[in-house]
Every structure is written in C-alpha cells, then in structure tokens.
Amino acid sequence: VQLQASGGGSVQAGGSLRLSCKVSGRTFNRNVMGWFRQAPGKEREFVAAISWSGDSTYYEDSVKGRFTLSRDNAKDTVYLEMNSLKPEDTAVYYCAARLTNNQSAYFVKRDEYRYWGQGTLVTVSS
C-alpha cells in the first residue's frame, strides 16, 4: 500500500488549506484513514480519522469545528479540509491507513496504523 499526501503550503492565520491523501496498491475501501501531525521538536500526534464506510469520524479536540475529514472511495482519496488555521497548526501532516473488517471503526493511536504517507508541510503564519 502506498500513500501519497499533498496539499500542504504556507498560509496566514485564519486561512484554509485542503490536504489530500491518495492510496494505491490495495483495496482502499476497507482502510480506516487517519491524519497525524508533527511539529518541530514534538511528538507526532493524532488529528483526525475516518472509518472506511465514511459514517464515523473522530477529531482531536483542538481541530474540532475547524477541520473536516472526508473520503471519496471512488477516487481512493481522503481529504482534510482545514479552516481557521492557527500558527499552532504548523506541522508536517501525515496520512495513515489500516485495513479493517469493521466498516464503522476508526483508530486514534499511531501504532494502530500500518501504512504511512511521506508527509506534507503546513505552515501558518501570524
């Protein structure tokens, strides 16, 4: 399974970005997808996750109401819409995948994911 993340960039506080993660090499439809981020000098932390059916999503508290995770199974792609961006959102963002038989399951821990993308940098200036 290969994950290709894209969409990062530099924006001012209050701006928006949309990250994409395209999955290839295996059945996308049964993969839980998650996003994590890692700021300089900090641990990689959970941001959001979506079940493979798309009916369940979960967000880290600091991004609730600002970030929206969705998926297009026909395009093997997940999208992280990020609005009202803050300087503290600055980080390298990584998408991750894990196969599951539970269509409504999602995962929030790093070690629960098997496949990872290469990361895309998001920089938010004040």
Image: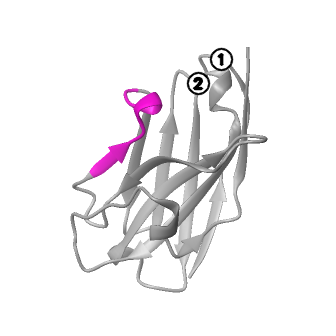
Q: Point out the image quarter for the N terminus.
A: bottom right
Question: Which residue is at 65% across, 26% downward?
Answer: 88
Nearest the viewer among 11 and 86 is: 86
At which x and y percent is residue 106?
32, 61
Q: CA distance from mark 1 to mark 2?
A: 5 Å
Q: Which residue is mark 2?
A: 85
Question: Which residue is at 69% across, 33% downward?
Answer: 90
Horizontal arrangement in the rendering, residue 111 relative to residue 56 (left or right): right
For the record, the magenta segment spans 57-65
Question: Which residue is at 30% across, 49% downward?
Answer: 57
Q: Which residue is mark 1?
A: 13
Is residue 60 on the magenta stretch? yes
Mark sitting earlier along the chain (1/2): 1
- Residue 77, numbered label: none
- Residue 11 visible, this orientation: yes
Which element type, helix, strand or loop, lies under badge 1? loop
Q: Please rate how many residues cluster around mark 1, counting C-alpha atoms within 10 Å: few if below 14, some from 14 to 19, many from 20.
A: some
Q: Quadrant of residue 65?
A: top left
Task: Specify the farthest residue to the top.
Answer: 126
Q: Is residue 70 above or below residue 85?
A: below
Is residue 16 on the magenta stretch? no
Q: Please rate how many residues cluster around mark 2, counting C-alpha atoms within 10 Å: few if below 14, some from 14 to 19, many from 20.
A: many
Looking at the image, do the residues carrying marks 1 and 2 touch, with CB atoms under 8 Å apart? yes
Question: Which residue is at 58% across, 47% downward?
Answer: 19
Identify the amino acid type marked 1: Ala
- Tag count in the figure? 2
Q: Quadrant of residue 109?
A: bottom left
At which x and y percent is residue 22?
55, 66
